[in-house]
Image (cartoon, rainbow, N blue to C red):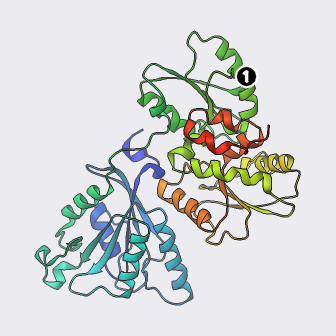
Amino acid sequence: MTMNQTPSANRVHIAFFGRRNAGKSSLLNAVTGQSIAVVSQVLGTTTDPVQKSMELLPLGPVVMIDTPGFDDEGELGSLRVKKAKQVLAKTDVAVLVAEAGKPLGPVERELLELFRQRELPFLIARSKADLSGRDQTQAQDGEIYVSAQSGHGIVELKERLAALGRRESEPRLVGDLLRPGQLAVLVTPIDASAPKGRIILPQQQVLRDVLDADAVALVTKEFQLKEALAGLQQRPAMVITDSQVFGRVAADVPEEIPLTSFSILMARYKGLLETAVRGVAAIDHLRDGDRILVAEGCTHHRQCEDIGTVKLPAWLRRHTGKELSFETSSGVGFPEDLSPYSLVLHCGGCMLNEREVQHRMRSAVEQGVPITNYGTAIAFVQGILRRSLSLFPELLCLLDGTERS
């Protein structure tokens, strides 16, 4: 996969915030070297977030995001501000754009407080420095004077953003659980919901991480698994399956071979797994009429056997014996108020970056609503959650009294 093909969820998200006409769009265009955002002297020109994927060296693949003015007014303006706040949920590095020569006002101070609350690394870009007659010698800590018109400070801005986005270590999907030469068996069903000509993103990413660990991958369909295992001379270090066929795969894989799912690995990768394991016990406490939010990070055409709207509701109703109500959200449409729900069932989150998954998880926890994810919930209702977490012994203590015998 080339740098330009890196999934958005695996890119560092750098977002530009500020008042209307502060120079956010011009600055985004200068940083990307392209006319991505519409630039105008008219207040409120940017009505929706605009984003551009690029490579920011030495950091790597990033997404640059321009946002509507945080001081927009009126009914439409409030909707634009809401859009800007939604971007905060997935921002890894924030840029506050404020005009050079002007003191920070209430809007800028509110944004800085939001950055700090979310523990976001940030930088204050003092825009239109060419018009103010000021330069970097007047900058305070955490500030940089820039001009999109003249190009002044743009190179240094990019360098400082790259430094802010750098992490000491990158999380791994599965590579840290494998030694070179070990074998991982990946079970990937190809059904009506599978994308034409390729496997789904979590499967692609796990396969790549296995190879990056210098381990060996065997990819098979679920109905070929038993025969494939019988023909192996080397015992697999683990079997990783699509959660939808968890039960069948568990029956075909010997107990001594660790078993987990792509969804569980993705929850671990995004920092959701421990909370998902804690939250899954809520399934056994659901009552008739309880509302469950099924949240997905992507939008897709739903098939007749869709996992979120058909299979999971059926499994939960069968497991609990209760009449449950299911509601769905897709893409960026995650509700702010979760109080109507007794449980949040979230997808693996492969299309969301870690920040946004963490934001959704914290929203649920802070509102006292249990949250779990697809793979964890499916393993739980099929009675194999303890087995599916055998690769993560530190989480097994959370299951005491949770799974039905």
Which residue does the numbered mark 1 point to in the structure image? Answer: 252
Rendered view: 30 above or below 176: below
- Tally of marks: 1
Q: For mark 1, does the 10 Å Cα neighbourhood hold few (<14), some (14 to 19), or many (20 or more) residues?
A: some
As helix, strand or loop, the secondary structure at mark 1 comes to: helix
| Location of residue 278 in the rendering, given as x and y in whole percent from the top left corner | 64, 51
Rendered view: 234 above or below 359: above
Of residues 277 and 38, the one drawn nearer to the viewer in this rendering: 277
Rendered image quadrant of residue 268: top right
Rendered view: 347 above or below 81: above
Q: Is residue 322 visible?
A: yes
> Which residue appears farthest toward the left when viewing the image?
137
Rendered view: 304 above or below 48: above
Q: Which residue is drawn at 39% across and 47% down?
A: 4
| Location of residue 152 in the rendering, given as x and y in whole percent from the top left corner | 16, 70
Q: Can residue 375 be seen in this view?
A: no
Left or right relative to 367: residue 83: left
Quarter of the C terminus within the rendering: top right
Left or right relative to 288: residue 267: left
Of residues 115 and 32, the one drawn nearer to the viewer in this rendering: 115
| Location of residue 263 in the rendering, given as x and y in whole percent from the top left corner | 61, 42
Q: Residue at x 55, y 80 (%)?
A: 79
**Mark 1 is on which residue type?**
Asp
Of residues 285 and 62, the one drawn nearer to the viewer in this rendering: 285
> Which residue appears farthest toward the bottom when viewing the image?
74
